[in-house]
Structures are given as structure tokens and as C-alpha cells.
Image: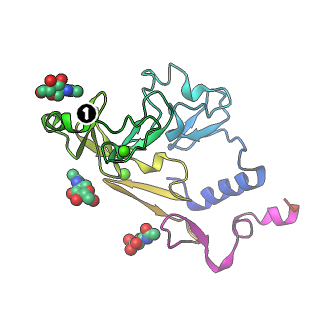
Amino acid sequence: SIAPSLLTALQCWGAMLGAAAPISTCSPKQFACKDQITCISKGWRCDGEKDCPDGSDESPDICPQSKVSRCQPNEHNCLGTELCIHMSKLCNGLHDCFDGSDEGPHCREQLANCTALGCQHHCVPTLSGPACYCNNSFQLAEDRRSCKDFDECTVYGTCSQTCTNTEGSYTCSCVEGYLLQPDNRSCKAKNGESLQEAACPWALLGGA
Ligand SMILES: *[C@@H]1O[C@H](CO)[C@@H](O)[C@H](O)[C@H]1NC(C)=O
Ligand SMILES: *[C@@H]1O[C@H](CO)[C@@H](O)[C@H](O)[C@H]1NC(C)=O
Ligand SMILES: *[C@@H]1O[C@H](CO)[C@@H](O)[C@H](O)[C@H]1NC(C)=O
Ligand SMILES: [Ca+2]
Ligand SMILES: [Ca+2]
């Protein structure tokens, strides 16, 4: 893994050059755009939105199966719209999709179909048939019935510094000289040192 001092030096460069500054090598958690300059979070690859300047994160050779919906794991795409609602809001007695398609007679009619489907965690009826979904921190596996760990570290911003995925969860940690905050995801420099003071003495000289 990258030494903490190198990491802070890289973050330091990032701070000096501005948040959108291109770096030529991407970390293992990042996707390298075809322009060979831009790095984006792997979680943004094939998510239905172009994040690379050249759009290469959504190109057909990178994303072979075109996305059926752009919803997060355990979310449902309301028919004919871009609205995503959590699967637990299907058949919960409240209209959550604009057209109310998340509620209706299918909620009762498909209960037996749900049982037959054999979901590992949860099952809900939808207009297109029963569907499985998973507890938080899990996502549906390829068989659409069992659940597998969701790697939260692929989602940009999960942790402010170091992210470690675990089975059914994740943990954030901080590089040397920083303390994890009560929110368990952000880091603060010890002794009130700022990033610039601690890692970028030349930034103070240059007035950057
Ligand atoms: C899912 O979460 C619920 C409530 O947090 C818990 O009771 C249940 O055991 C979990 N199910 C699985 C399969 O982990
Ligand atoms: C639900 O099950 C019934 C009877 O087993 C079947 O006729 C119906 O087509 C099923 N519906 C769906 C949406 O799978
Ligand atoms: C942070 O982690 C501690 C220890 O695991 C836990 O008790 C606490 O509830 C967590 N705080 C938040 C905001 O998740
Ligand atoms: Ca609902
Ligand atoms: Ca996880």
C-alpha cells in the first residue's frame, strides 16, 4: 500500500492544484479515463452518467450490458421515470412513485410468487413480478436471489481518507497524524495542524 507520507504529499499536490487537478496515475479504487489524465471513482463507471470528460466511463466497450436502470443497489426504478425509491417502499401502503405504480392489487396477488422466488433476505411484489432485495450493506448477486457484500469503498466520499471494505460493512481510518471523528468517516489533523502546515511547508512559502 501507499506510504502515509506519500499519500499526504499527493493530497497536498491535489490541494495546491485544485480539486479537479488531473493526476496521471489512478489508485486501485479509481477508474482511468481514456484521456489518460482523469481518474474517477470506480463507483462512477457505468452508473449511467458521464463522469470522464470524454465519457469513456460509459462507453459500450467498458459497460457491455447497458444499464436497465441507474438506481443504487436495493432501489427500484419507478416505471418510465428516473425516480429511484428504496425497495422497502414498494407495497408499503404509501404512494412513492409519481404514478403510484409501487402500490396496487399486485401487492397482494404476488405474495405467493414471492415465497416461491426464495429470496435470501427480502422479497417485494412489483408490476413486473416479484423481486428480491437485500439488507443494508448488501446487494443482489448475479442469481438475483442471494445477497453479497456491497463494497462501500467504491462509492466516492464514503470515507474522507482510508476506506476498508468488510463483509456486511466497512470501516474508515485516517493516515498518521489524523484522528477519526465521531461520525466514523471524517479525519481531523492532531494538534490542530492543517493539511497545508503538516504536509506542504512549501505551500506556505509560495502563498499558494
Ligand atoms: C436483515 O436485517 C434485519 C434487521 O436489521 C435483521 O433482523 C435480519 O437478520 C437481517 N437479515 C439477514 C439475512 O442478514
Ligand atoms: C404468480 O403466480 C401465479 C400462480 O402461481 C401465476 O399465475 C402468475 O403468473 C405469477 N405472476 C407473476 C408476476 O410472476
Ligand atoms: C462510530 O463507531 C463507534 C464504535 O464502533 C460506535 O459506537 C458509534 O455508534 C459510531 N458512530 C456513528 C455516528 O456511526
Ligand atoms: Ca410505496
Ligand atoms: Ca461492504
- Secondary structure category for the residue under label 1: helix
Name the residue: 30% across, 36% down: 104
Residue 182 covered by magenta stretch: yes
Say whether residue 105 is visible: yes
Toward the bottom, the furthest residue is: 191
Q: Residue 58: give x, y in percent of width and height.
A: 55, 26
Q: Quadrant of ligand 1?
A: bottom left
Nearer to us in this view, 43 or 109: 109
Q: Residue 15: give x, y in percent of width and height.
A: 73, 55
Residue carrying label 1: 106
Q: Is residue 206 left or right of residue 139?
A: right
Name the residue: 42% across, 22% down: 65
For badge 1, the amino acid type reads: His
Q: Residue 137: give x, y in percent of width and height.
A: 35, 51
Q: Residue 26: give x, y in percent of width and height.
A: 59, 41
Residue 201 covered by magenta stretch: yes
Say if disc 1 is inside 8 Å of ligand 2.
Answer: yes
Above or below for 37 versus 21: above
**What is the span of residues highlighted in magenta in the rendered image?**
180-205
Q: Quadrant of residue 87?
A: top left
Query: Would you call the spot at circle 1 few (<14 residues within 10 Å), some (14-19), or many (20 or more)?
Result: some
Q: Quadrant of residue 120?
A: top left
